Amino acid sequence: MRAMQLNAYGPASDLALVEADKPRVSADQVLVEVGAAGVNPVDTYIRSGTNNYTASFPHTPGSDGSGTIVEIGSDVTGLTIGQRVYFSRNLTGSSAEFTVCPATHVFPLADSLSFEEGACLGIPYTTAHRALFGRAHAKAGDKVLVHGATGAVGIAAIQLALAAGMTVVASAGTEAGAALLREQGVDAVIMHNEADHLAPYQSLENGFDVIIEMLANHNLDQDLKALGFGGCVAVVGNRGTVEINPRDLMARDASVLGVALANVKPHELDLIAKSLRPLLENGLLKPVVRKTYSLSELPQAHEDVLKSGALGNLVVSIK
């Protein structure tokens, strides 16, 4: 099978297209013929061995994706050969024609979604759901800021929050990003590259119940000042350190919560998938695919996913 691989930690340019053996499944696993693979920042961390991530070599990148089940382990129930699925984790890398997945991390793909759209679910939508509901316990009527909202998780968080009846404020760094947020139904768009962009919200009366934060090392200090009483910041993304004043938390009875998809147990993943399914089927959730790459273009996708000014999801079509 064709796969993108590298043999040591390194830059995206080290990735090469190779012919590899088709992987085999164990009793509790399934083999998926990959239709499309998601491209997420975590893939670049694993590839380069940064942020405490490690890999074994040769390494095929790609944590999530979608496709068709072609083989099922003897202990697997509830899934069938030929079924269209998406997955939030795999064992052999999704940037390949076939990948092995734990059956616990494979879920039915809504008929309304393409494989490219399905490749946006495993990490972005699952993470956004976990951040909003599993960690921040957001509910209808809450005032929510999605800080850095134009990327994959941000768009998912906006759609989920609006579908649940929350009041959403979202930030963008470009006019194109602001336009995308308005297309998603956000009425209050702020530009996070402007100085003091959170100032109108930095009071107990105007603060947020929940902030979904995509770049905590830049924003957490100011986020805390923009919380209402009892509010919380759910940290989805971070690329460094930051200094805060704990008194901003104390004055508001506020909290900061970490969000890491790796910590979510299989039964929780199943519940998230079941929650997402009707929303996807009814069109309340709709992944935004910014760009689709060919398999050999994966190095460029790894470069692009870390650039500012994201406008949705990046995916690799496996053809």
Image (cartoon, grey):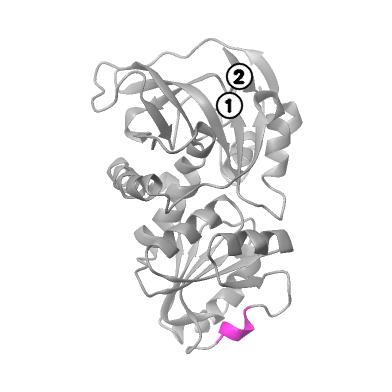
User: Residue 14: x percent and y percent?
Assistant: 74, 27
* Numbered mark located on residue 95 in the image: 1
Q: Tags 1 and 2 in contact by the CB under 8 Å rule? A: yes
User: Residue 148: x percent and y percent?
Assistant: 61, 62
Query: Image quarter for residue 76?
Result: top left
Query: Image quarter for residue 162?
Result: bottom left
Q: Judge whether 197 appears above or below 155 on screen.
A: below
Q: Is residue 6 left or right of residue 188?
A: right
Is disc 1 surrounded by few (<14), some (14 to 19) or many (20+) residues within 10 Å? many
Q: Judge whether 188 appears above or below 85 on screen.
A: below
- Can residue 126 be seen from the camera position used here? yes
Query: Image quarter for residue 267?
Result: top left
First in sequence, mark 1 or 2: give its number: 2
Q: Secondary structure at mark 2?
A: strand
Q: Is residue 206 magenta?
A: no
Residue type at numbered disc 2? Ala
Magenta residues span 198-202
Q: Main secondary structure of the magenta part?
A: helix
Q: Secondary structure at mark 1?
A: loop
Q: Is residue 200 magenta?
A: yes
User: Residue 52: x percent and y percent?
Assistant: 56, 44
